Amino acid sequence: MDDVELRQLVPHVLSVLVRRGADFATAEDAVQEALIRALSAWESELPSDPTGWLITVAWRDFLDMTRSEAARRHRELRFDTEPPAGAIPSADDTLNLYFLCAHPDLTSSSAVALTLRGTVALWNRAAPAGTPVVSCSSLTARASSSNAAATVSPECACRPSS
């Protein structure tokens, strides 16, 4: 089945989803996801009922999207965005920040740059001579590509150069 024939099925699949109770925008997104899956799944063999296949996959995608959105809303309601009332304990997280910036998955030049930027507040322009200078984009790429991405805190992230 070529792209033109596949596109001709979209209005029918979309109308079935809307008739089942899906809102139009989410139904469109679900149909697009189903089309992407169809292109990869139908390379080797076309299903006996392409329209039925698209409707089934799009409906399941719609349900997944709806459940995901409901779970997100539930999490947002459950965890109030307002800080708790009362005194906020003062804690010095500097040591924790040092450990995060010196994570073993980071290269030594990235660790030095993160430490200077995150804890000493030195930036590329103010870095002492001989200090490895790493651009923000390469530093961010290194940090996010390592396994330390989940443990490197936002305090270690570089700020955009001005």
Image: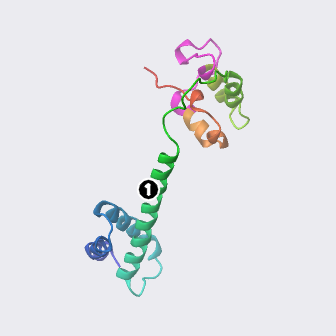
Q: Position of residue 77 (x, y in %)?
A: 47, 47
Q: Main secondary structure of the magenta part?
A: loop
Frontmost residue, 108 versus 155 = 155
Residue picked out by circle 1? 69
Q: Quadrant of the C terminus?
A: top left
Frontmost residue, 58 versus 65 = 65
Image quadrant assignment for residue 36 = bottom left
Q: Secondary structure at mark 1?
A: helix
Q: Position of residue 86 (x, y in %)?
A: 56, 26
Under mark 1, the amino acid is: Glu
Image quadrant assignment for residue 152 = top right
Q: Position of residue 90 (x, y in %)?
A: 64, 21
* Magenta-span inclusion, residue 140: no
- Residue lying farthest to the bottom in this orientation: 48
- Residue lying farthest to the front in this orientation: 86
Q: Is residue 146 left or right of residue 104?
A: left
Residue at 59% across, 24% down: 88
Q: Residues within 10 Å of mark 1 (few under 14, many from 20)?
A: few
Frontmost residue, 2 versus 19 = 19
- Residue lying farthest to the right in this orientation: 104
Q: Is residue 36 above or below residue 101?
A: below
Q: Is residue 63 left or right of residue 147?
A: left
Residue at 67% across, 22% down: 94
Q: How is the image coloured?
A: rainbow
Q: Is residue 56 left or right of residue 78?
A: left
Question: How many marks overall?
Answer: 1
Residue at 63% across, 23% down: 89
Q: Is residue 23 above or below residue 139?
A: below
Q: Is residue 104 above or below residue 125?
A: below
Frontmost residue, 8 versus 3 = 8
Q: Quadrant of the N terminus?
A: bottom left
**Residue stretch rendered in magenta on the structure:** 117-139
